[in-house]
Amino acid sequence: MTYTHGFDPVPGDIKAIVAQAANRVMVNPGAVRSETVGGESVTYLIPATGEALGVLLSRAERRGLRPTGAGRARTGAGPLMLYTQSIAILRAPVVEDDYGNEKADWADPVRLPVDGVNVQPAGGSTEDPEGKQVTVSGWRLYTPRGMDLDLRETDRVEAWGTTMQVVGKVARWPAPGGGVHHVEADLREVD
């Protein structure tokens, strides 16, 4: 495909949406919605307005084409987000305890500063271990399109003076054409 307007270079997510739309036209050039062989019935995909059918984009494709600007980026079909927050990834060295077992030593973790991410509240819960009332707040970390992050499931994240543990796997979403589209990670506050 030849792109004559817009971004130079054209971002991979836009190329993917254009390729999907072109593929729909190539696979179904007559815009047939349904066919019946016995009795010969054909139904065409015509918009409710009755206008001539061009190349239509799905809702997800339209959301993926939302505009971007300074400090903003698309996350595919997700909402438009600001990526202006700075965090520190905390990585504990592994030490051996008195019994010869390996454990993380959080007394003096390595601090890896990271700029240009988004951390948002993602719900919370209340637990009652051993008769204590503890509030656990959930957060979600996002990177902008094209940004990979050296974040491991054993790491912690510090933002706004709050320390949070990575919960579960770090999601590295693949980009069309290779690489990482963006990274997401669930976080939970720790003492």
Image (spheres, rainbow, N blue to C red):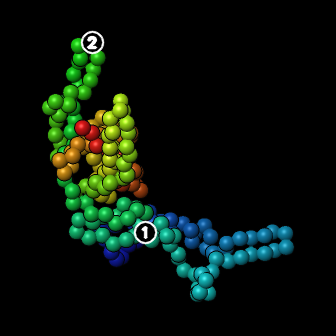
Amino acid beneath label 2? Tyr
- The kind of residue on which mark 1 rests is Arg
- In percent of width and height, residue 9 lies at 30, 66
**Which residue is situated farthest in the left direction here?**
108
Q: Which mark is residue 176?
A: none
Residue 103 appears at what percent x and percent y?
Answer: 26, 23
**Can residue 180 be seen in the rendering of this structure?**
no
Identify the residue at image location x=51%, y=70%. 58
Q: Quadrant of residue 13?
A: bottom left
For the point 17% across and 47% down, the residue is 161
Q: Which mark is residue 99?
A: 2
Q: Residue at x 24, y 38 (%)?
A: 191
**Would you name the residue on which mark 1 appears?**
63
Between 90 and 10, the one nearer to me in the picture: 90
Residue 169 can be seen, yes or no = yes
Residue at figure coordinates x 25%, y 55% from the top left: 117
Q: Mark 1 and mark 2: span between their CA atoms?
A: 54 Å
Residue extending farthest right = 39
